[in-house]
Image (spheres, grey):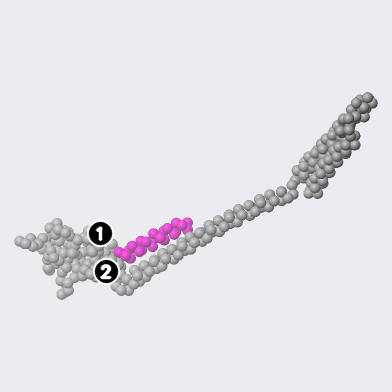
Amino acid sequence: MKKVLGIIMNILTWIILIIALLITIIVFSSGRNNGVANLMGFIPLTVESNSMFPTFAEGDLIICKQIDDLNTLQENDVITFWTIIDGKRVKNTHRIISINQAENSRSYVTRGDNNSLDDDMPAYAGDIIGKWTNVRISGFGKVMSFLRTKTGFFVCILIPMVLFFLFELYKFIVTLVEVKKSDAAEQLDEEEIKRRAIEEYLAQQKAAADAAANPPVETVEKQAGNDTVSVEKVENTAIEKVEDVKKASEPAQTEPAETTQNTASESEAVPSEQANENVEKSVETVENSVETVENDSNKTESTE
């Protein structure tokens, strides 16, 4: 409803503005043309007497049209022309009763519809202003007469036009402010989006760092389990190596005396003491490997 009222107000405002502009043009045009306004060939006139009553009455506004070819005028046409009344040159609008044709000129005998006698002087070609178009606006002639005065022009034309332009300026400023507010709101939205994106990115980075520093319990247990399996595997390997070394040393002790005597020269190359030293070194290596694995397992448990 509010929007409809706004549209109606805008339409009325423009109508008033257009009327004011037309009246302004009429006033200034009539001032430059001996009191006869001409708008693209159309002439608005105010009826100042009842001589043509009932065709039109005093105070009415009639619209006449400029005549390009006076030979087209016929009897019963209503024309406006200049004439002398009481010693003054005034405009008169009467009906053509007859046409006087001379050798090089024409004159028109006129009479008012409310008069019983013809006009004292005929209308000549140079005196004719225009022909009535059968258009009249009742009572509007008085309004036109008032608007032609300084007071009427100031009150009815100048002030409304100033108010109209001030109102349009106000609407323009309001629209400009709303556009700026909209732009500011859009800019704030963009800044908010950027801020949220940065916060999400930082949160992701922090979560990744926390995950790296504190791995899940399942992962630690799995790693510890793998370390335990590795320890057991190393222990089994060590035991197998020790057994292999023992097996390798047993045949030398169980062989018969004869075989021992026959290989005495070979035993000198690899004494039994050296074999024992090799066994001890293998055992130490295995023990060191077991200790290393156990230390790694302890480190993993402390991290958990």
In the structure shown, which secondary structural element does the residue marked by tag 2 occupy? Answer: helix
Q: Residues within 10 Å of mark 2 (few under 14, many from 20)?
A: some
Query: Does 152 appear above or below 41?
Result: below
- How far across and how far down the image is residue 277, in percent? 88, 38
Left or right for 276, reference 162? right
Magenta span contains residue 5: yes
Query: Is residue 52 visible from the viewing direction of this image?
Result: yes
Q: Amino acid at mark 2?
A: Phe
- How far across and how far down the image is residue 229, in percent? 81, 38
Q: Amino acid at mark 1?
A: Val
> Which badge, 1 or 2, is on the more N-terminal residue?
2
Identified at 45% across, 65% down, the residue is 173
Identified at 89% across, 34% down, the residue is 271
The magenta stretch is 1-22
Magenta span contains residue 203: no
Q: Residues within 10 Å of mark 1 (few under 14, many from 20)?
A: few
- How far across and how far down the image is residue 88, in percent? 17, 74
In the structure shown, which secondary structural element does the residue marked by tag 1 occupy? Answer: strand
The numbered mark at residue 300 is none
Query: Does 254 appear above or below 129?
Result: above
Residue topped by disc 1:
135
Identified at 30% across, 67% down, the residue is 24
Q: Nearer the viewer, residue 137 or 283?
A: 283
Of all residues, the one furthest to the left in this rendering is 103
User: Residue 113 appears in which quarter of the rendering?
Assistant: bottom left
Left or right for 188, reference 10? right
Residue topped by disc 2:
28
